[in-house]
Amino acid sequence: MSPRKLPPAPPSVEDAGGAPRFGTFQGALDVVDLSRLRGSYQPNRLDRLRMHKKWLYGFIATREVAALFAVVDLGYTSNAFALALDFASGRVLADVGVLGLPAPMVKVNDHPGAGLEVAFRRPDAKFKAWRTFGDERFHGHVRLGLNAPFVKPKLDLTWDLLAAGAAPPLTVIAPVDKAVVNVTQKWAGLLSFGALEAEGRRYSLDGGVGGLDYTHGYLARETAWRWAFVCGRLDDGTPIGLNLVEGFNESRDDVNENALWLGNELIPLGRARFTWNRSAVLDPWQVRTDDGAIDLRFTPWAAHQEVLDLKLIKSSFKQPVGLWSGEVKVGDHVYVLKDAPGVAEDQSVLW
């Protein structure tokens, strides 16, 4: 039996009446403009300030090194983080999280694909990602450390991800309990280019595999999820990517962001269920899907963790990075995944 195909992404988030076009799609939205929503789907000004969230997350890995990074715009504040891991030695080359003010310190615009512009700027941390209209690639740069003469950065990451010729992205427009809507575009299994410099060494990212998570929504004050993101290759060199989530974007049967990117195919998956030790995220993880397509085990090597308690705002964010192994079933074929780079995540936030 051939894998199920998803319908193409709609021309806009909203329909003619201003209601969200809830569903799961293949392909990208040109723009995510939540100001076009109408009626009960457009919160008042105070609720927009409270609920409006946007971010871009990226992951890139080769056999030598993995790098992850994110820029998060919470409206009333912002943050960014990055981690780099050397697989040969097991050393964490850099692990930094920084807080910032709202715009103009941070920018995540309304274009998840072509036209993307993302930035976060502090004297000791600069993040940038973009894709101009007509460009076949996403581009980005992360520099951690003061930009001063004779001062070497903790991390200098320059990356490209090739969109042309890849499987399409996954787009999900999901209702949110006790809020309004979440729009997310996930894209994994993209070929990478660039370089990472840290601790006096330069790592090439050419020939690696990566992916992006663009998310933009009016989200609930209390939000929690488990997440897995995998970007690697099969033994024959075929790029593979996986996005698996539990506890988020699953409030209706027709919204589901679990997906597999295999070569130039995007394949939807069933609901994901995670087994992990919440008090020790560096213990092994397991994730399976209820359609029997995914049975994977995760061996963490390191983790980026942020625990914040400001009473009105609380966050427990734990994201281990490591290697995924197991079985991926597509139709009658079983693919064996061996030591594919990726992350897991346990997030619980009051924002």
Image (cartoon, rainbow, N blue to C red):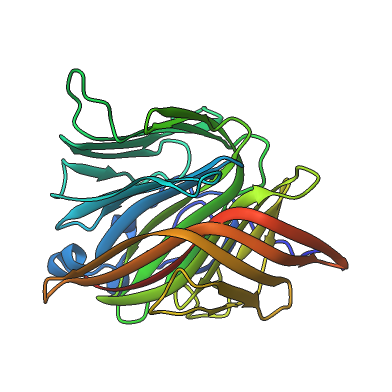
Residue at (78%, 64%) from the top-left corner? 3
The residue lying furthest to the front in this view is 89
Closer to us: 11 or 147 = 147
Q: In this view, does 222 lie to the left or right of 183?
A: left
User: Count of labels shown?
Assistant: 0
Pick the quarter of the image with the N terminus.
bottom right
**From the viewer's perspective, is residue 234 above or below residue 195?**
below
Question: For the point 21% across and 24% down, which residue is it?
Answer: 151
Image quadrant where residue 295 sits:
bottom right
Q: Residue placed at 41% from the left, 75% from the top?
A: 280
Please tell me in which quadrant of the rendered image residue 106 appears: top left
- Where residue 81 appears, as percent x and y from the top left, is 31, 50
Q: Is residue 133 visible?
A: no
Q: In this view, does 24 lie to the left or right of 52?
A: right
Q: Which of these two is toward me, 135 or 157?
A: 157
| Residue depicted at 60% across the width and 74% down the height | 287
Q: Position of residue 128 (x, y in %)?
A: 33, 35
Residue 117 in sight from this viewpoint: yes
The quadrant of the image that shows the C terminus is bottom left
Q: Where is residue 313 in the image (x, y as percent from the top left)?
A: 16, 71
Q: Say if 106 sits above or below 75 in the image.
A: above
What is the quadrant of residue 209 in the picture? top right
Tell me where residue 132 appears, x and y as whole percent: 44, 29
Q: Nearer the viewer, residue 349 or 276?
A: 276
Q: Determine whether 327 is above or below 113 in the image.
A: below
Q: Is residue 131 left or right of residue 337?
A: left
**Of 33 and 214, the residue lying toward us:** 214
